[in-house]
Image (cartoon, rainbow, N blue to C red):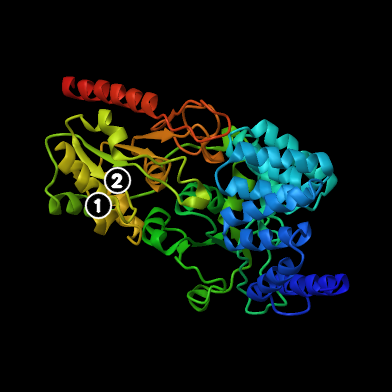
Amino acid sequence: MQQVNIEQRIQLAQSFHRGIDMPQNLDAAEAIYNEILNHATTHPFVEYCLATLHMERGNIGLAIVLFHDALKGDPTFAECWNNLGMCLSFAQHPQASDKAYARALELQPENADILSNRAGLRINAGRATEALDFANSAVRHKPEHRQARFHKALALLELGRWSEAWDWHESRLEPPDSNDGIQAGVALRNYSGDPEKPTPWWDGKSPGRVVCHGEEGLGDEIMFASCIPDALARGVELIFEPNPRLERLMARSFPDVHVRGTHYLDGREWTEEIGEPDFKLACGSLPKFFRRAAKDFPRTPYLKADAARTNEIFQTHGALSGKPRIGIAWEGGVNSTHVHLRSMNLTALEPILQHDVHWVSLQYTPDAARNAAAYTEQTGIEIHHWPDIVSAPADLDEMAALVSGLDLVITVCQTALHLCGGLGVPCWVMTPSKPAWRYGLTAPTMAWYGDWVKLYRQKTTNLWTKDDDWSEVVAQIADDLTTLLSERRAA
């Protein structure tokens, strides 16, 4: 194959790969890249393109191999070093990832993509100050860089610099750039029925009818809902669109709000009944108006469970009287939200579970019932697990009713703790050494909830990799539980 033909084939493959002047077709692009490599077996750019394609498809191991091959042919290929760093990060090798980013940055010191990636890596490692430095540098070189702006927001949130953080946090609402590393952004909603006249954003003070829609995980929607009373105090008519699983709980907790649990983007389920809103707001933007300083967090309960349902649950499942009822959850999140950092198995919790109480599972994952049953069979310690109440598809109003009937909840970082925070139920949280921004970096409590939510922080033993040792956290909780139960018996 002649050189000119190789260049023409590369151009065609790139068009298929990126959808340039034609529909995107990754299969066609991959076939052409492979065809080229059959004739030019050491072509670093084509190896880079093929590796990038596999990275986008989630074939991370194969992509890493191909990026390394490309760099053997051209060790000064900065974009290749950067993408290798991304793959190594996806594969949970943050230290190797940062070395790749560092090499890329040596070659292109002002590249905002690389600077932003190094910031993101440090956010995940709990190194917020360093992350902020890299994010600031990226924004200086490219002020419109959405990922860098978002990483700056996360670093500021981790540091509790609220007044600065929330303004930068609005970057998540900007149209996503296919190359910026943020997978989707927030799906923008329009309630006007006219794509040419989208519903305007609320400015935090204008009167009228405001729709506030959900945008993130269940825990975040519960957490941000603590700002709803502040919004109502501005005199607006408020419509809240949470996850459908939260509708009943939010409707009971906020009777002066129109609560409609939906994922639709146009209000089709309620606009005829309630009327078209004057303004819209993503729930993650509420704190921008109402939580700009530490003193702005009221740290008081704001959710209301169904008391009658609480009694019914325990009557149906044997009352569990005579001993304290304590909830337990041991796994939180998914791959994209670092499940590996905030989960453990039940055997690691044995020093806690040996206490003579009624243990009630709050674990919602598909294998929770099997895990609880296996642990009971192995140890003789019974963990009551009621999947109709706590499984992932269940209405969170059911779980709130269950939680409100417990004396204490011991959990990893997951939805259960946010329910406890909103309801005012005592909760002890096993917090990883590299937590998400919601938990801060050092404080024993969260800004969002009162002192009834207590953080037991895992110590950092390795700045880059996952800390597996939970023994000190578990031992401390076991000791504190012994003290609590002794005080209860004495009382």
Question: Image check: 189 left or right of 328?
Answer: right
Asked if residue 165 shows in the view, the reply is no
Which quadrant of the rendered structure holds the C terminus?
A: top left
The residue at the point 72 percent across, 66 percent down is 37
Badge 2 amino acid: Val
Answer with the quarter of the image where residue 300 lies: top left
Residue 138, horizontal then vertical, whole percent = 78, 44
Query: Which mark is first along the chain, 2 or 1?
Result: 1
- Residue corresponding to mark 2: 403
> Along the line of sight, which residue is nearer the eye, 397 or 173?
173
Instruction: Kindly identify which numbered label has been placed on residue 369.
Output: 1
Please say if 23 is above or below 88.
Answer: below
Q: Position of residue 124 (x, y in %)?
A: 58, 40
Residue at 14% over, 51% down: 317
Q: Residues within 10 Å of mark 1 (few under 14, many from 20)?
A: some
Residue type (three-letter) at the residue carrying disc 1: Ala
Quarter of the image with the N terminus in it: bottom right
x, y percentage for residue 348? 31, 33
